[in-house]
Structure formats: structure tokens, C-alpha cells
Amino acid sequence: MTTTELSDLERHFERTIEHDLRVEPRDWVPDEYRATLIRQIAQHAHSEIIGMQPEGNWITRAPSLRRKAILLAKVQDEAGHGLYLYSAAETLGADRGELTQRLISGKQKYSSIFNYPTLTFADVGVIGWLVDGAAICNQVPLCRCSYGPYARAMIRICKEESFHQRQGYELLMTMMRGTKAQRQMVQDATDRWWWPSLMMFGPPDGDSPNTAQSMAWKVKRHTNDELRQRFVDMTVPQAEALGVTLPDADLAWNQERASYDFGEIDWSEFKQVLRGNGPCSAQRVAHRKRAHDEGAWVREAAAAHARKHREAVAVA
Ligand SMILES: [Fe+2]
Ligand SMILES: [Fe+2]
């Protein structure tokens, strides 16, 4: 490619971003844009897939048929989200098998939140309310991401996330109308999940070196701290309506900022979990690896079938 051709392509890419149009798989993109998106979409896909485990743990022990049906549907949705996202990564030239390999070898990360245990059924409700709630805050702006396949996948994913959030909140409302022990379970789960939920937005802006470039490419539309603040402001009134206390003595309405102030996040815990030292990190990855190994025969059978089909078509 000549230098003029390359600069034409670069200009076209920049114009696409500038005019808020979508970049599509056939378009030329800078190598760093491609690498950044593959990394982000893969981490997102891994999070959806690993995220099935904490709640999947409760499917067989759901307290009623209705709760089991809801939970099963939700966990299946997460599998679907993972699959859309791996497909979006493939449009950038990534290989799905390789991405899975990177996940189970610990080379690629997933959201730190899924490394915490689910101790009671109230955790299912609190995950829907807080974890899916935080995911919505993070993901709604991604529906306007500059990369078309990712943005379009996010539209459907966000619709399903909003069902996840509501089923969680409805479960908690029901438990709060129940016995004292049930109300305590909800409070205990809220205490355990609140801070890890705030960590889901990633490190503070001052400590997030890639944010500026991602914002310039319109992959990211808001900084980590902006999204975290939005989540806190949205969630405090929900906690009040529910009748639970958020475990933060510094949480207070700030009239001037028209937002809630909140306490300091324990970033050392976040870093520990990201390094793979979360309470369930080893278990989550080992479980994913086992599922992948046990599924080898399915992949082989599908590949053999596809080969036979191709040969039959070639003969005909
Ligand atoms: Fe999801
Ligand atoms: Fe979800």
C-alpha cells in the first residue's frame, strides 16, 4: 500500500469517528483500534460466560419453580451475551478458540465481580439489582460505540440486562416483605456486594491510562468515575425504597454537586482480585476449563459434520 493510499484510509477512519458514524468489519482501522476492541470485547464476553457461575450455583436450589424458571432464563441470557460478543470479536479477526484459551490460561481477564461467592439465595437478588444494574450503567453508552457490531450487540444485551435487574429487585422486594431472617439475608448480601459493584467500573480516572484514547475513538463515552457516580445516584433511592442500608458511612447527598458523595473504595482489594487472588478466582477458571475440555467431543463432531457437508456439496 502506498503512503497516499494509507493516509486516505486513515482520513476515512477519522471522518467516520468524527461524524459519529459506525466503523464496520470491512473498513480499514488502525492496528491499535483493532487490538483495543478485541481486548475489550473479549474481556466482556469472558465476563458474561464466567458470570453464569455464581448464579448457576443456585439453579438447583431455587426456592420455587417460578424462581428457578426466572434464574434459568437469566443464566441462559448470559450465555447468549457471551456468544454475541465472541462473534463481534470474530468480525475483527479474532479466533474464538484462541480467546477461550487466553481465558482459561489466565492471560485474559474478566470482570472482578464474578470472583466473589454467592452464599445465600438473597445473593441472586442482589446480583440482579447491583451487578446487572452496574452492567447497565456501563453498557448503555456502549450502544453508541463507534464499532458497529459491538454497538448493535449491546442494544439487545441491554434490553435483557434490564430484565435481569428487575427480576433481582423484585426478588429482594419479596424477601423484604417476608420474615426477619429473610430481611437479614438481603442486608447481608447487600453489605457483601456493594463495594465490589462499585469496583466494576474500573480504576479511578487518574489511574486509567487507556481511557483518553478509548474516548477519542468513541469506544468509551464516559469515564469510569462518571459512570460510577451515575450508578451511585441511581441506586441510593432504590436502596431506600427497598429498606436496606448501603454499607458506607460517608454516603451523603451533596447539594452543590446534585449527586451523592461516597466513601473511599479499597483499591488494594480490587488489585488483588484482578491479579487472580479473589475468593473464587481459581474455582471459576478451573470450572470453565473443565467445561471446555468436556466439550471437546462436541466441537470435534461439529467440525467433522461441517467437513462432510462441504465434501458432499463439492461432489454434487
Ligand atoms: Fe449479560
Ligand atoms: Fe445480566
Image (spheres, rainbow, N blue to C red):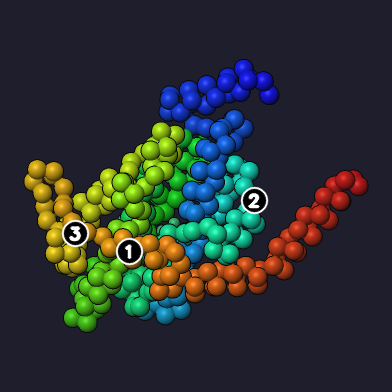
Q: Position of residue 166 (x, y in %)?
A: 32, 59
Q: Position of residue 309 (x, y in %)?
A: 81, 53
For mark 3, what is the residue?
263
Q: For the C terminus, which image quadrant?
A: top right
Q: Nearer the viewer, residue 10 or 17?
A: 10
For mark 1, what is the residue?
268
Q: Does residue 180 appear anywhere in the picture? A: yes
Amino acid type at image mark 3: Gly
Task: Sort mark 3 into few (<14), some (14-19) or many (20+) by Cα contacts within 10 Å.
Answer: few
For mark 2, what is the residue?
95
Label 3 within 8 A of ligand 2 by Cβ: no
Looking at the rendered structure, the secondary structure element under dot 1 is: helix
Instruction: Give the farthest residue toward the left.
Output: 255
Mark 2 or 1: in front is 1
Q: Position of residue 266 (x, y in %)?
A: 28, 63
Q: Position of residue 116 (x, y in %)?
A: 38, 70
Image height check: is 44 above or below 215? below
Mark 1 or 3: in front is 1
Residues tagged 2 and 3 counted as in contact (Cβ below 8 A) = no
Point out the tag, 2 or 3, that comes first from the N-terminus. 2
Q: Nearer the viewer, residue 116 or 308?
A: 116
Marks 2 and 1 sit apart, C-alpha to C-alpha, by 34 Å
Looking at the rendered structure, the secondary structure element under dot 3 is: loop
Looking at the rendered structure, the secondary structure element under dot 2 is: loop
Marks 2 and 3 sit apart, C-alpha to C-alpha, by 42 Å
Point out the tag, 1 or 3, that comes first from the N-terminus. 3
Image height check: is 87 above or below 282? above
Q: Identify the residue at image location x=52%, y=49%.
A: 39
In this picture, residue 134 sits left or right of residue 155: left
Marks 1 and 3 sit apart, C-alpha to C-alpha, by 15 Å
